[in-house]
Image (spheres, helix red, strand yellow):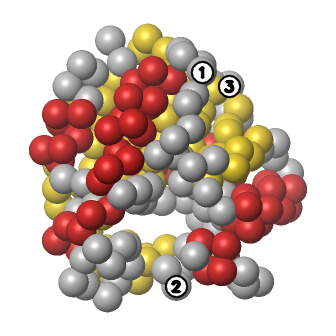
Amino acid sequence: MWDERYSTDDYLYGTEPNDFLREHAALIGEPPRDVLCLADGEGRNGVYLAGLGHRVTSVDASAVGLKKAARLAEEKGVALTTLHADLTEHEFAAESVDAVVSIFCHVPAAGRPHLHRQVIQALRPGGVLILEAYTPAQVPRDTGGPDTPDRTPTAAELDAAYAELAIELSRECERLVVEGRGHTGPGCVVQFIARKR
């Protein structure tokens, strides 16, 4: 599905980073830090962070998307590592990164507990998780995001999944999301920031 969606000359979600990430990127710390970008698709968020001087690995299930991410990195003159993986199964090395960035990473509910555990495991002590995703309230809208609530988390789910971390922000809200032609209007989102103790 995603290979097909990304098989166009343009970038489905544009080439600029997500607004929430841009607003909170300083929480990652002084570069260079090791950062995992989950479900990074065509690379806009990973390339942005690499441009700040971080060592970024963009992870996605779409090989087509990752090829476009590598091309975008080359165009911007930054180094980007790409990893083709299924986030509901992949295991990350323990305490291997300083930050995990999860922007509109929508995996089925059955696979999310595994992913949540992997995020906690991958973070070094003091490392930060920066997450924005659509909530179930977004599903009936025609402005982006999954067409089934099964792929959308709630703040309550994230609070429970990451209870062992120090949660710095956990809220559901509506905001204008304009990112390429893929996200085009008011969106119901959850915004979540937590740090490993």
Tell me the residue at 70%/32% (across/down). 55
Q: For mark 3, does the 10 Å Cα neighbourhood hold few (<14), some (14 to 19), or many (20 or more) residues?
A: some
* SS for callout 1: loop
Q: Amino acid at mark 3?
A: Pro
In which image quadrant can residue 40 be found?
Answer: bottom right
Of badges 2 and 1, the one in the foreground is 1
Where residue 36 appears, as percent x and y from the top left, is 58, 37
Of badges 2 and 3, the one in the foreground is 2
Q: Amino acid at mark 1?
A: Ala
Q: Is 157 situated left or right of 113 in this image?
A: left
* SS for callout 3: loop
Tell me the residue at 34%/23% (across/down). 195
* SS for callout 2: loop
Where residue 174 appears, as percent x and y from the top left, is 20, 68
Judging by the rendered image, the residue that carries numbered circle 2 is: 181
CA–CA distance in space, label 2 to label 1: 35 Å
**Residue 42 versus residue 77 in the image, above or below:** below
From where the camera sits, is residue 188 visible? no
Which residue is the extreme one toward the bottom?
Answer: 142
Q: Look at the image and tell me in which quarter the N terminus lies.
A: bottom right
CA–CA distance in space, label 2 to label 3: 32 Å
Of labels 2 and 1, earlier in sequence is 1
Judging by the rendered image, the residue that carries numbered circle 1 is: 93
Q: Is 66 situated left or right of 18 in this image?
A: right
Q: For mark 1, does the 10 Å Cα neighbourhood hold few (<14), some (14 to 19), or many (20 or more) residues?
A: few
Q: Is 38 situated left or right of 116 in this image?
A: right
Of labels 1 and 3, earlier in sequence is 3
In which image quadrant can residue 160 be found?
Answer: top left
Residue 32: mark:
3
